[in-house]
Amino acid sequence: MKNKEVVEMLREIAEYLTIKGESRFKISAYEKAAHVIENLTQPIEELDALGKLTQLPGVGKSIAEKIHEYLTTGKSSYLEELKREIPREVFELMEVPGIGPKLAMRLYTELGIRSIDELEEAAKQGRIRKMKRMGVKAEQKILKGIQIYRMDAGRVPLFTIRPLVMEMVSYLKDKTGIERISPAGSFRRWREDVGDVDILVATDSEGQKVIELFASAEWTKEVLWRGDTKCSIVTPTGVQVDLRVVPEDSWGAALQYFTGSKAHNIRLREIAISKGLKLNEYGLYREDTGQKIAGLTEEEIYEALGMPWIPPELREDMGEVQAALQGKLPNLITEDDIRGDIHMHTNYSDGADSIKAMALKAKELGYEWIVITDHAIGLGVVGGIDYDTWKKEYEEAKQVEKEVGIRIFVGIEANIMVDGEVMISSPDMDFVIGSIHSGLDGSREKIMARYKKAIYSGLIDSIGHPTGRLLGGIRPPMDVDIDQLLSMAKDKGLFMEINAYPNRLDLNGPNVFKAKNMGIKLYIGTDSHATMQMENMIYGVHTARRGWAEKKDILNTLSSDEMEELIEKLKARRKAISV
Ligand code: DGT
Ligand code: CA
Ligand code: CA
Ligand code: ZN
């Protein structure tokens, strides 16, 4: 099946077109088609062979031809042509947060900059401020971007590696019959980005076999180190994965040790020492006699240290050990608690799927309700909907609601414009998310003034993807004063979003923690633009858990009746403002 390759080809074309400054319409045609094919379960070759490519939503004649050419010849002459026109170096420059395609192209052509090192030199020499429409500020922004880029370097967002790691674990389990195989490290703690991946295997007799399977599998591009109990490899995308084999009776101790974090482990070791015990990756021992008192499971280790088992997401030394000792650990929200999804797009705006498709997917996921929030007008980039179109969408949703048998609320994702105006909101709408989609590089004063005006207008119920960051060095967060934002949200009774789109995770764990401690309610929104993406809910749930969120903190755990009741209140509140 070549779907993945075709998706990559289409996305690459879209990237090149962006750099060329082609119309947004043309670019999003390729992005949309890529989106659709990404979610296709059938091999694209089959559709092509049947001449049915154009039946896919978003795939017109011209894109179908390019796919056909790629499937028959292994390349796209259109893409080759684009590659001749635009040098590869421009893409490297775009890896610096804050440098978009146009600026990258200008830096390349006007200053002849060919690498990030050269860019840094040029900025330090003050050559960038001399370019047209650039200045000292722009130059400093570039230097800051380079700093962020270097900081991120070597770490990858969790979602880019998670599917492969899960595949590794189940493959090794299947082939060996060993039950005790688990990811550890930052991966198991659900950190949003990981330096390397750690996998742990407990076996007394099959270590060699596991290591052989691991090192010779398709995912191994290069073996860095191979010994009797440890093997480190590099995946095709350049991520290092460490596999460790430990004795069966050390499973719990090793899992605890290698899950970390380092700071959490240090805390635990302090507790152990204060009790006359010694904790390491083999077990928990009495200091005086050397007798082993725990090691087989994590639970027994925590118990022997006088506390309940601590969920991995909490092991960041944010007070979890203290809380555990006092019996005050939060009762974290779980995937099973989720009864609905807030924030998703349909083909009314830039989503790939219909209301019905989204509703059916929600039903498949076992939800009771969803809140659809298509983009409103004012977005510039993607076509957003106006009030009349929203009204139509609402009516269609009511139809679908009956057909599918799931509660469908229809809200909107309103834009908080550059001047803080909310575009658009109405008391009829079930839920109004206010999001910033433009001018993300504004100063802290500007961003906060926009948020303030929008929040105090009374027209929005929540803040969507509050910092606007995109993981993987793509876009740094806006210059948001998060404490001030949370205080304003609290003041006006707004909800804060935990955007579960895996390259957003916004709010992130630490900010969820802050919001929760201020008594602000949150919700998880997958921000899905296609049915498949609704499965990203897990990233939101685990981000919530990293912020210590409990069931009661998160709107998605409400029943459909409770949600309806809340929505009636929100509508009444908005109505009171608009009269
Ligand atoms: P990463 O890979 O940078 O995303 O973060 P981790 O947490 O996965 O760190 P890694 O891979 O270096 O080590 C995995 C775990 O092993 C770490 O979370 C805790 C444990 N560990 C590693 N080195 C030390 C150490 O020097 N002391 C202690 N107490 N634990 C360590
Ligand atoms: Ca690691
Ligand atoms: Ca490691
Ligand atoms: Zn948005």
Image (cartoon, rainbow, N blue to C red):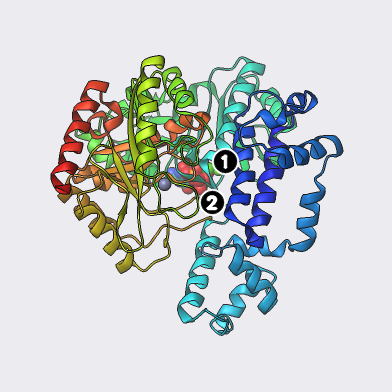
Residue 454 image point, x, y percent: 26, 55
- Where residue 526 appears, as percent x and y from the top left, is 42, 36
Q: Which residue is mark 1?
A: 160
Q: Quadrant of residue 37?
A: top right
Identify whether 276 is placed above or below 425: above
For the image, the number of numbered tags is 2
Where in the figure is residue 578, as x and y percent of width and height? 17, 48
- 43 with respect to 126 (left or right): right
> 423 or 540, which lies in front?
423
Using the image, determine if residue 294 lies above or below residue 25.
Answer: above
Element at label 2:
loop
Residue in front for this viewpoint, 61 or 288: 61
Viewer can see residue 311: no
Amino acid beneath label 2: Gly
Q: Residue at x 76, y 51 (%)?
A: 79
Ligand 3 rendered quadrant:
top right
Label 2 to label 1, Cα distance in Å? 9 Å
Compare marks 2 and 1 and give the one earlier in the sequence.
1
Q: Quadrant of the N terminus?
A: top right
Amino acid type at circle 1 is: Thr
Query: For numbered disc 1, what is the local secondary structure?
Result: helix
Please indicate whether residue 288 sits to the left or right of residue 326 in the image. right
Q: Which residue is mark 2?
A: 472
Residue 160 seen anywhere in this rendered image of the structure: yes
179 to 355, vertically: above or below = above
Q: Residue at x 65, y 25 (%)?
A: 207
Which residue is at 22% across, 40% downward? 427
- Cβ atoms under marks 2 and 1 closer than 8 Å: yes
- In-image side of 8 versus 470 (left or right): right
* Residue 430 or residue 504, whichever sits in front: 430
